Amino acid sequence: MERWRGVEGIPTKWGRCVVTIGVFDGVHRGHQQIIGRAVEKAAELGVPSVVLTFDPHPIEVIRPGSHPPMLTGQRYKADLVEELGVDVFCVLPFTVDFMRLTAEEFVHAVLVERLHTSAVVVGENFRFGNQGKGTVASLAEDGRRWGFSVEPFPLQGTSQTTWSSTYVRSCVSAGDIASANEALGREHRIHGVVVRGDRRGREIGYPTANLEPLPWSAVPADGIYAGRLVRGTGAKAELLPAAISIGTNPTFAGAERRVEAYVLDFDGDLYGEHVGLSFTARLRDTLRFDGVEPLVAQMALDVERTRELVAHPNG
């Protein structure tokens, strides 16, 4: 899959293509179906498929200081999109000037002049252009003018809820990892760099990797989780079962919120590595214990439960 940034990244001799447009934060099951349909449409027409997305999140530019927690960084989002068979992942910088483009200007400057679009596949609630005045209906009208078709895709979900990035963020924020994972179609994952902590875990027999998450990461609610530490990307990624703690370490009167992972059966140095943490299940709330001994006893139970859920999921 090719990865472009900005309209400048589009090859000058680029031909026709099928485009799908959106922030696609999380690449949840609804997104997957929209993108999948774009890939199918491209195959039908014999042209490449393009996912067109934005960075930073448009809301941060429209209302500075209101950046939502992000379910996927751009690199991980691109990896997920690639798995869906897309040919090109194109990120457009969302600037103040870009925000001011009218819907008609966006269509002409990006879809027509640069991408030479044959067809566009978008969610039925798609809005675009300055103040969100562009709609699926106006896009279809532009398509008739400029020679591309528009296929609106119905919202997806269950009888109880519609899958959306906002819904998944709310589940993650509440610690409802089961519902978040169901909507995502995979385990929620955050990324960051392993940094040095206070090394207290090593002293009590449970050395942890302290993760400094990427900015704006959708970190789950405080609690103890079963999951995996992820080293590398794609098919070559190494998935290591881990018991993950999120919180302030109340037993030791901690004040700083931390994300720490005890990697089962691991003896090595992770400091400075860029890794991911995926969340399989929530085990319990973060608790304050009366001393180290009851804490260590509970950690042993957490590790055993993690082993059952992650290392031996069918056991």
Image (spheres, rainbow, N blue to C red):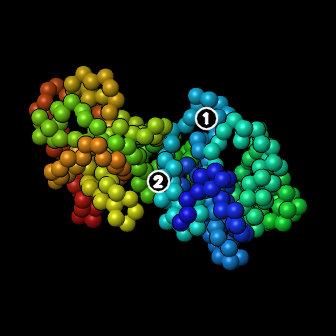
- The answer to the question of whether label 1 and label 2 lie on touching residues, with beta carbons closer than 8 A, is no
Residue closest to the eye, 22 or 291: 22
Which label is found at residue 210? none
Which label is found at residue 76? 2
Amino acid bearing label 1: Glu
Identify whether 170 is placed above or below 106. above
User: Is residue 13 visible in this depiction of the protein?
Assistant: yes
Q: Quadrant of residue 131?
A: top right
Q: Is residue 254 left or right of residue 51?
A: left
Give the mark nearest the N terminus, 1 or 2: 1
Q: Quadrant of residue 204?
A: top left
Residue 296 image point, x, y percent = 14, 37
Amino acid bearing label 2: Tyr
Q: Quadrant of residue 205?
A: top left
Q: Is residue 94 left or right of residue 206?
A: right
For the C terminus, give its image quadrant: bottom left
Q: Residue at x 69, y 35 (%)?
A: 96
Residue 303 image point, x, y percent = 20, 48
Q: Residue at x 24, y 22 (%)?
A: 253
Identify whether 103 is placed above or below 158. above
- The residue beneath circle 1 is 60
Q: Residues within 10 Å of mark 1 (few under 14, many from 20)?
A: some
Q: Secondary structure at mark 1?
A: helix
Q: Is residue 47 left or right of residue 206?
A: right
Residue closest to the eye, 95 or 70: 95
Residue 142 image point, x, y percent = 85, 57
Furthest-front residue in this view: 12
Q: Residues within 10 Å of mark 2 (few under 14, many from 20)?
A: some
Q: CA distance from mark 1 to mark 2?
A: 20 Å
Q: Residue at x 22, y 55 (%)?
A: 307
Q: Residue at x 70, y 58 (%)?
A: 122
Residue 53 image point, x, y percent = 62, 52
